[in-house]
Amino acid sequence: MGDPAGRAVLVGIVERMCGEPTALDAVVRAARDKSPSVAALPDGEVRRNVAALLRSVARGFAGAAASPDLAAADGLAADRVAQGVPLAGLLEGFQAGRAHLLLALTEQARSRGVAPETLIDALVELDGFTTDLQNRLIHTYRNHELTLARTGHAIRVQALRGLLHGERGANAVDAGLDPAKRYHCLIADVVEPREAARVEAVLCGDITGFVDGYLCCVTPRLPVPDALEHIAVVASPAQPANRLATVYPLCRSALASARLRGLRGLRSITGLSAFVAVDAHPELGPVLAADLLPRLDPGKSFHRLLAQTALTYLDHGRQLTPTAAALHVHSNTVKHRLRRLSELTGFGAPDEPVTDTLQWWWALDSWLRAIE
């Protein structure tokens, strides 16, 4: 380029876009907004892949390589094939992210006074890099797709996806399931195909594969809970095969609630049902907290202690002894804290309806999570 100073400015802008969370968020959001297939994937999974692609582009643009590192494209394509994301959906997300990147670079370059000819040269170069990545995505995706298509397992996983999505024409037999049997639907908090093998061995399902970016399993029997203590796995009650599409979205919502609270191990959707209902309306929690807990000050550690004690008390069925054991304090300490909270908020009225108990739990949970 004829303007080394302008070029240096552009390199700095691209490198900052790779390193700043808000800039990365914007690219991820553009990809998810444009592609429903990408939007169905876990946000962290999309961020990981977008960050890798941006780093390869930035490194090439900075002059460290004559072309972008294609390994990032290879990894992305292989993951999306395994996760069942169609090539069209992958490219929609990629192209939306590329368009956002070039537009953001243009806007920032103009605000920094970069000469138009320097900017045009940079856009042409970046377009070449991203075109190389796109071509590699297509090539690698098709190769992996052809390889998998030759296996019976891939055919069954594709049928499983259709069954869980409730697609017309999908049936249990194609997924290797018996329509006369009942099956649990399990979703594990595993999003990277490379990590799937060890979890699949524990799940021992009739059919296991990635659906919407998460490792799913359909099985007539639940796995041994002790083997899954390190990871969150959500399971539905056993259902006829033609009802799996009904419980699958509930399992996804339950897994999101479990992840939000850092829960691990094998969990049932019935056991997580209250969390799912609460998380469906996140804006209501702060409203309840403001209404029921106006005298609690987040800046006071003692008030935080009172709220945590009350929430633990509700989680343990309003029983003093289990609450004290969970908090590693004496029962009298729990009584004192609850009495003080009652003076501040009115918490703990005797014989209150179950709906009031839920409101207190929701308010306390929301109040505490807001200050974490």
Image (cartoon, rainbow, N blue to C red):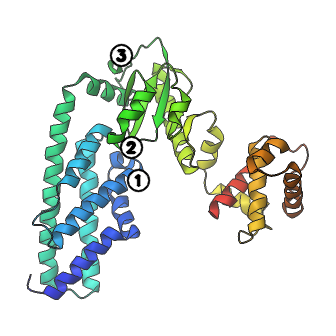
The earlier-in-sequence mark between 2 and 3 is 3
Position of residue 53 measured from the top left corner of the image (x, y, whole percent): 25, 59
In this rendered view, identify the residue nearer to me: 151 or 301.
301
Instruction: Check whether the beta carbons of the residues at disc 2 and disc 1 lie within 8 A of each other.
Output: yes
Mark 3 surroundings within 10 Å by alpha-carbon count, few (fewer than 14), some (14 through 19), many (20 or more): few
- Residue at 12% in and 87% down: 3
Position of residue 88 measured from the top left corner of the image (x, y, whole percent): 23, 45
Apparent side of residue 365 relative to residue 162 in the rendered image (left or right):
right
- Residue at 14% in and 82% down: 118
Position of residue 228 measured from the top left corner of the image (x, y, whole percent): 51, 34
Q: Amino acid at mark 1?
A: Gly
For label 3, the residue is 173
Element carrying mark 2:
loop
Element carrying mark 1:
helix
Q: Amino acid at mark 2?
A: Val
Up-down: is 278 above or below 201?
A: below
Q: Nearer the viewer, mark 1 or mark 3?
A: 1
Instruction: Check whether the beta carbons of the residues at disc 2 and disc 3 lie within 8 A of each other.
Output: no
For label 2, the residue is 191
Instruction: Check whether the beta carbons of the residues at disc 1 and disc 3 lie within 8 A of each other.
Output: no
The disc label shown at residue 290, or none: none
Q: Amino acid at mark 3?
A: Val
For label 1, the residue is 44
Apparent side of residue 57 relative to residue 338 in the rendered image (left or right):
left
**Residue 94: quadrant of the picture:** bottom left
Up-down: is 125 above or below 89?
A: below
Mark 2 surroundings within 10 Å by alpha-carbon count, few (fewer than 14), some (14 through 19), many (20 or more): many
- Residue at 79% in and 40% down: 317
Up-down: is 268 above or below 134?
A: above
C-alpha gap between disc 2 and disc 3? 26 Å
Q: Is residue 2 visible?
A: yes
